[in-house]
Every structure is written in structure tokens, then in C-alpha cells.
Amino acid sequence: MLPVALSCGEPAGIGPEIAVAARAVLGDALPFFWIGDPRHLPRGAAHKVIGHPDQALSVPAGLLPVLAQEFAGAATPGEPDPANAAGVIAAIERGVALVMAGQAAALCTAPIHKKALKDGAGFAFPGHTEYLAHLAGDARVVMMLACDALRVVPATIHIALSEVPRALTPALLEEVIRLTHAGLIRDFGIEAPVIAVAGLNPHAGEGGVMGREELDWMAPLLARLQAEGFALKGPLPADTMFHARARAGYDAAVCAYHDQALIPIKTLAFDEGVNVTLGLPFIRTSPDHGTAFDIAGKGIARPDSLVAALRMAAKMAANR
């Protein structure tokens, strides 16, 4: 058994405290180690510094295994310090290197604060996902949000709604479907995945009355992929795709834009959703929330999403 690597993320956010809380929940049933500066852990947090990932397997359940990463400064909850940006980036890079070297089963990443990274280290990437793709040799990746009840993949992500019809091209949608299909087989152990594809327009265009994308190119694209052997449903009206009976008929939903995908999963599992990057040569998961500066250091942050992300990372590693 290999442990899961957990990069510390933004040290002024809730990352350090939910790492300690996740260890308390999981104990030694799911071994993982935290990459970060021990000074950034909550005062009095029970931890043990290790020198190599495999030592995490023998750390008592009551202690958080820590692979120490030196940072330039201390961490004040709720107050990100750009001086720590280089350390945050180095922790991510170290986690990737350890997984790629076969010394960790998977990488789980705590939330980062992109402005602090840009201000302190000139971080030029929109977020974690793009940076990890870069570290993996500019791999083509997609973002999946997953919980026990639903898996969703937005084809377009952080762009204005007005830009979606131009960005959602046949080539992009085909790539997202192919990456999702491969990820469901390789990382989730689903031999013959069924994928539901949401239409772009209300009621999936309603026969062209509310938009023609579904008729003009989405349906022909899905028909071509179905002829290759893909099990696809759609293009479907997004407003009828996410009730329980509909969800039982597919393994993942590919959606046209950000909110079409994230609203249903955050409604179903606001505290337990997991961000998964499909298409990387290694497994990466992350809790589906941000740094939560407003509650950092107050001892009230819930570790549910991080626990779910660690569990999913370990399960995906076993499937691979």
C-alpha cells in the first residue's frame, strides 16, 4: 500500500486545520501524508515529521504524518502572505514528483489562493488544474466534480456565459467526452460507461425553436461517437437530467457550461463533493471548496470534502 500525498495549499486558509481533522476521521485506515511547513499547522496539532513517504504507513493514527516543506514565512489565518507563494507551488511540485516516481499512490491538493501565488511568485496559471496539466507535459485534461450520487464534467469552465456558444465547439465536446469515457474506465473501474450529454439551450433547443446547436452539430457528433461504440445519451434537456431516476441511467454527465454542471452536484453534496482531474498520468483529487479565509483558524471548518477527496484518491489508485 502506498500513501496518498496531500499538498498543503494556501497556509492561511483552512487547509492545515482540515488536514489534521481528516487524519482524526480516517486514522490509519487510509494512510496519507501532508506536505507543508509544520509551523503552519494549528497550535498543538498532533503530528510527526517523516523523511520519506513510506514512513507515513507506520505513524500512529493519532498523529498527522508531515513531509516538511520549508516556507518563507509564518501563516496567519485569513491573511494570505505572498511570501509563502513559492512554498505553496513547491509543495504541489513535490507531490506530483512523488506520485510520478511511484512513492505515493495519488495526489490530493488542498485549496490555493491564486492571487497570492500571482503576487508572490508570478503564478501564471488560472488554477490548480492547468498547472498540474503543465507539470504533466501539457496533458489534455478535464475537470470532474464527483460524489456518491453524481459525476459531472463541464465542457467549458470559467468563462462568461456569453462566451459559451463560441467556446463549445464540436472538437471540444468530442475531446471532453473521450477524456471522460477513458477516465471512467481507468480511474473509476467502470467497464462500459454510459455518459449523458446536456444540450446547450433550454429544453435542448426544443427542435430548433430555442437554439439550433443541438440539431446542427451536437446530435450528429453524438451519433458518430455512438457508432464507434460509445454509450451516450443526448443531447438532453439539462432541467430533467438530474433527478434521482434520471441519474440512475448514466455514470457521468457532460455539461455545456460551469453552472449547468456545478449547481446539481453542489445541491446534492455541498460538503462532500470532490474535484477530480481526468487525463493526467497520475491521480489528482481535491476538496470542492476554496480557502475559506472567513473561517480559517476558528476551528469550525468541516473536513468532509477533504475526507471524501482522500477516499476517492485511494479508490481511484486501486482501480488503476
Image (spheres, helix red, strand yellow):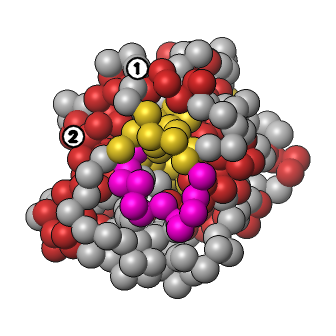
Q: Disc 2 and disc 1: Cα gap in Å?
A: 21 Å
Give the position of the C terminus as an image quadrant.
top right
Horizontal relation, residue 311 to residue 294: left or right:
right
Q: Secondary structure at mark 2?
A: helix
Three-letter residue code for mark 1: Gln
Horizontal relation, residue 78 to residue 57: left or right:
left
Residue 172 image point, x, y percent: 34, 43
* Residue 41 drawn in magenta: yes
Tell me: residue 17, above or below residue 320: below
Residue 257 image point, x, y percent: 47, 61
Instruction: Find the magenta span and give its range.
Output: 35-46
Give the position of the N terminus as an image quadrant.
top right
Name the residue rendered at 33%, 22% in the picture. Answer: 100
Residue 177 image point, x, y percent: 48, 35
The earlier-in-sequence mark between 2 and 1 is: 1
Pick the front one: 147 or 195: 147
- Residue beneath disc 1: 103
- Residue beneath disc 2: 134
Q: Nearer the viewer, mark 2 or mark 1?
A: 1
Residue lying at the far left of the rendered structure: 122
Three-letter residue code for mark 2: His
Task: For residue 198, say whether it is visible.
Answer: no
Classify 10 Å Cα crowding around label 1: few (below 14), some (14-19), many (20 and above): some
